[in-house]
Amino acid sequence: MKTIDFYNKNAKSFYDRTVGIDLSETYDRFLAYLPTQSHILDAGCGTGRDSKYFLSKGHSVMAFDASQEMCTLASKETGLSVQHLTFQDMSFNQEFEGVWANASLLHLPYGETKEVYRKIHEALLPNGIFYGCYKYGDDYMPTPEREFWNMNETTILPYFEELFEVIEIWKEKDARSSISPSPDQAWLHFIVRKS
């Protein structure tokens, strides 16, 4: 898959480009719905930046990524044993208070998204919280090196049906994507609760 190849080949430069991004406002929004010392699944953890933050706040974290090189970097960054795993290979059962999927699900084809959301639903404890974000739009956006499946406030909703209740959905100006920005120059964020 060319997207995974991209991350394997560009892990270090991706780390350098993204490690300093300030997501504290988004972290706080997510963590506000979780108990203290929650068990969080960082799904598609990339370089481990977000896992490291959650650990610093007293949470326990399990992290995985589909890119072996990202797993290696994230393990060094966090001290965790980061699993080499795809979304499709997830098989957790009611283990986490929260699932965090920051800018990772956007590489998942629309046809596979509902089944992955089912797996996330299964991974969560009752009333568990799921955060994710996508490049803003309603279409498939291939680039020479990666593939993106964009979402907006309307297109995302069918994927939540019978699985999650929406707590928050918001659009945010894209302040970080100098490479492959969405046509709207924005991100779609959501926080939902397991129903």
Image (spheres, rainbow, N blue to C red):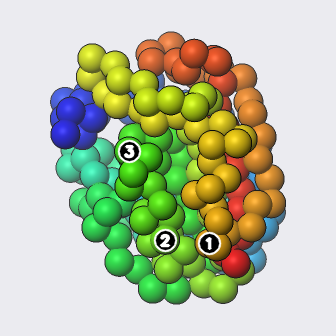
Distance, label 1 to label 3, CA atoms, is: 19 Å
Marks 1,2: beta carbons within 8 A: yes
Q: Position of residue 101 (x, y in %)?
A: 52, 53
Which quadrant does the C terminus fall into? bottom right
Q: Position of residue 135 (x, y in %)?
A: 56, 31
Can see residue 11?
yes
Q: Is residue 159 left or right of residue 119?
A: right
- Give the mark, 2 or 3, whose residue is nearer the N terminus: 3
**Which residue is label 2 attached to?**
118
Marks 1,3: beta carbons within 8 A: no
How packed is label 1: few (under 14 Cα within 10 Å), some, or many (20 or more)? some
Q: Element at badge 2?
A: helix
**Which residue is label 3 attached to?**
109
Marks 2,3: beta carbons within 8 A: no
- Amino acid carrying label 2: it is Arg
Q: Quadrant of residue 193?
A: bottom right
**Which residue is label 1 attached to?**
163
Q: Element at badge 3?
A: loop
